[in-house]
Image (cartoon, grey):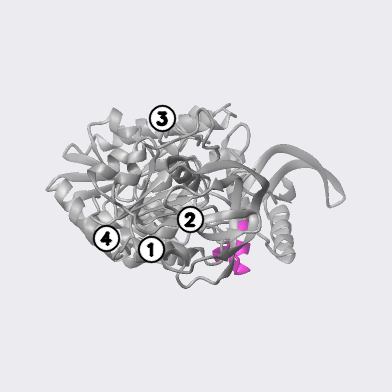
Amino acid sequence: MIHAEWICIVDFGSQYTQLIARRIRELGVYCEIHPFHLALDVMRANLPVGIILSGGPSSVYETDAPHIDGSVFELGVPLLGICYGLQLIALHHHGAVDPAAHREYGKAELRLDNQADLFNGVSQDTTVWMSHGDSLSRIPDNFEVIAHTPNAPICAIRNAGKKQYGVQFHPEVVHSVEGKTILSNFIYGICRAQGGWNPRSFIEQAIEEIRETVGSERVICALSGGVDSAVAAVLLHEAIGAQLQCIHIDNGVMRKNESAQVVETFRDEFHIPLKFVDATDLFLDRLAGISDPEQKRKIIGATFIDVFEKEASEFRDAAFLAQGTLYPDVIESVNFKGPSATIKSHHNVGGLPERMNFRLIEPFRELFKDEVRNVGRELGMPAHILDRHPFPGPGLAIRVLGDIDRPRLDLLRDVDEVYLDEIRKAGEYDNIWQAFAVLLPVKSVGVMGDARTYEFTVALRAVTSIDGMTADWARVPYNVLERISNRIINEVRGVNRVVYDISSKPPSTIEWE
């Protein structure tokens, strides 16, 4: 989509870059993230109302440090540099950046020297979140200091005439108590944005663009039953009605009774054309003996393409393929040629269009998951679909560690059903970003009915998060964990030990594989 009003976030590899985007979207203004080496061309083609330079892990003086052409400061667009972005402002305006005498990581007390524009309505003393080793030692030309901390005499600067600002702290992080006010001041007070980015405006524009793109052609949608593909299917059906044909493939690594629920919901409740394909045997045959998680992903992806290609070929009048790709999938799968690294491949970015004669429709490729949920609510979709926890594309294949076979998958399905049932009964489900069980390739000795057992161990994982980029382990009450453990061991034959994962992301990932 092309937006007349947008904010460009220039990415220099910060772990918080996506968080900046989420905060701007929450404020009702559309924004996009672009890598530092491409952003200037994008902005020249479609001038934004504001620019934010993200933080980053590098030092501005390092040989391979990411930089942006100095002409970004001459576009006549208001600009805010955050952390590394502040240091780039200093570098381009003859300031100085040096290793700080005291590195700052975590909370710091910010003292405002000027409460106008950027800090309008912000307390003179406020708590902010720091994450830096370098700091400014000389003010850039034509800038003034507008805030400081005990360890950073130059913590925020401005050139009011050019509407260029820089802050050493991270206003996008929740630990910066008044960070959202600061970002709002920049977006609305300095950039003069009008706002209006919301689920209804997105739906109206998306429907218009889908209809214009599709015309009278037919669209096929790969419907997994997860939040993203489910909302995409309903949005497409709203836009083009019977021109939409959904295909649901049971790959054998889904949750218990999931395919039956997908068919019932979308065919019977939403009245969306849906073809169901049970390809369990094919997927499990190809996964037999495979223990490496990346191999599992690739096999599942390739097999899905094979099956989908065969099934889709029956609809010869279809010209488009719809997918529920999200913005984080796109960002993480793009080679930004910068300091950020790809952690794992994404199953739903790329692949099918190269092998099939389809044009691609990805209505959510600019949205975060919470925005997709809000779109679904605006479309009248029920909470039991929209509030489901994320489920990985490779499904239970990456939650059965080691080799995969039908008995292990069935065992994990039963464990997962008990776990989620008890989480819901305890009223904890909606407080958790994602909860799931992992079957470990480990057996241990137990005692049941005075007899020795030697059975599997399962790990329970539950995390709290805003967007899945970072996560903390959920503090599920002990009595709830006790009930879950008792039910699993008593009801699921083959398990005699349950453990709870208390690692956060980072350093761990949410999924085990």
Residue at x-position 40% and y-position 39%: 35
Name the spot of residue 46 as percent of width and height, x first: 24, 47
User: Which of pointers 1 and 4 lies earlier in the amino acid sequence?
Assistant: 4
From the viewer's side, name the closer residue of 304 and 29.
29
User: Under tag 4, what secondary structure?
Assistant: helix
Q: Which mark is residue 422?
A: none
Quadrant in the rendering for residue 478? bottom right
Q: CA distance from mark 2 to mark 4?
A: 39 Å
Q: Is residue 28 visible?
A: no
- In contact (CB < 8 Å): disc 1 and disc 3: no
Q: Which region of the structure is painted magenta?
A: 419-432
User: Which of pointers 3 and 4 lies earlier in the amino acid sequence?
Assistant: 4
- In contact (CB < 8 Å): disc 2 and disc 4: no
Name the spot of residue 359 as percent of width and height, x first: 23, 38
Q: Is residue 197 magenta?
A: no
List the residue tagged with mark 1: 374
User: Which of pointers 2 and 4 lies earlier in the amino acid sequence?
Assistant: 2
Name the image quarter holding the C terminus.
top right
List the residue tagged with mark 3: 302
User: Which of pointers 1 and 3 lies earlier in the amino acid sequence?
Assistant: 3
User: Which of pointers 1 and 2 lies earlier in the amino acid sequence?
Assistant: 2
Q: CA distance from mark 3 to mark 4?
A: 32 Å
How crowded pointer 4 is (Cα within 10 Å; few <14, some 14-19, many 20+) is rated as: some
Amino acid type assigned to the residue bearing label 2 in the image = Ile
List the residue tagged with mark 2: 157
- In contact (CB < 8 Å): disc 1 and disc 4: no
List the residue tagged with mark 4: 203
